[in-house]
Amino acid sequence: MYRIILAILFVFVDLTCVSQGINSKAIEITNVDSDEYTHIETTKLKMVLPAGFVRKNATTYENLLAQSYISVQQLDGDVNRNFYTFDKKSMFKAGIVVSKETFFKINGIDAMMIDGDQYIDEKEFAVSILIIGNCTLSYLIMGTTPKPIQNNMNILITNSLLSTIFNPKMEAGAISKIYSYTIDTTGTGLVECMPMGNSRTFTDDGNVPSKTGDMTSLTIREMSSAIQFTEAQKKDICLHRIKLYPLTWDENSKLEPQKYSTGKLSGYEIYASGVSKFMKTEFIYQLVLFDKDRYFVITGISYGDEKKCLDAFRKLANSIEL
């Protein structure tokens, strides 16, 4: 699911604010706050979550039995602009085939629902996305469930998304509540961006994607694991992920994971440079650190100086405090 969101957020169209044509198509919904509602802690949103969904972190809820998730991400700017940013063409580039777009006014607030399908690791998922907000603040709320769908989970997720109450005056909690670990960016030149599910993204200018020439970014994803990995499996996790990049690797790059330790966590590191289809040289950094029933997947990407990036990526990874 988090790969879906990352892919979507990196597809951005530079558009001005939209005319009121969208509003004429909107279906009006009135939601009334009650004890059934859950405040999404670091946002100005409340939702009625489907039965069986429990808190994973401050912006993500999951039903592990159904392998289903609901996650919230804050977006920059006017909600109407974001409607056009996440159009069918852009979503297709992000790997989601859109089957339907529906416009709403929820308690007078503009919103758009996107329904579609996505393949992840050879599994098909039903995806529902609600974009809601005003001219200064908007949110993307995503729900996913595997197909074939059982017990109408996609309908339950859709109804949950449409139960959303957006209140600009609502108090949003601190972002630090989301994660079970801390990071120190001092001396790395990286700035933490808005949270996204169980992923933390850092870029060289605080924008996603970065607007600099180097476009340096690093993402940390915390993953749960019910098994203890062997050393061979740990190496495979690291190697498999870097091989997903569609690059022609430099002949001097050795795609062989090496042992790595931060002093508190250990795992495997691999980094290499390669040429993309756009004939640009990219530096890719991959580090996977393991801790009991979870592990951290750390991925860095840059068009900039490799040594500078490697030092920054390692420094940030070494700062992880559990």
Image: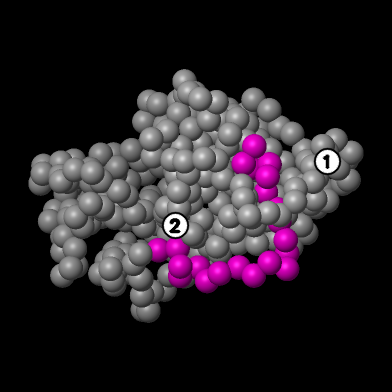
Q: At x 62% / y 50%, what residue is drawn? A: 36
Is residue 165 covered in magenta? yes
Q: Can you identify the residue that label 1 sits on?
A: 28
Are there few (<14), some (14-19), or many (20+) residues within 10 Å of tag 1?
some
Residue 72 visible, this angle: yes
Residue with the most extreme front position: 35
Q: Which SS class for mark 1?
A: strand
Mark 1 residue type: Glu
Residue nearest the observer in this picture, 284 or 57: 57
Residue nearest the observer in this picture, 216 or 259: 259
Span highlighted in magenta in the image: 159-179
Q: Which mark is residue 57?
A: 2
Q: Position of residue 25 (x, y in %)?
A: 85, 35
Quadrant where the N terminus sits is top left
Query: What is the spatial separation of the Cα atoms under label 1 and label 2, in whole angstroms?
Result: 31 Å
Residue with the most extreme bottom position: 186
Q: Position of residue 253 (x, y in %)?
A: 21, 48
Residue nearest the observer in this picture, 218 or 227: 227
Q: At x 28% / y 39%, what residue is drawn? A: 243
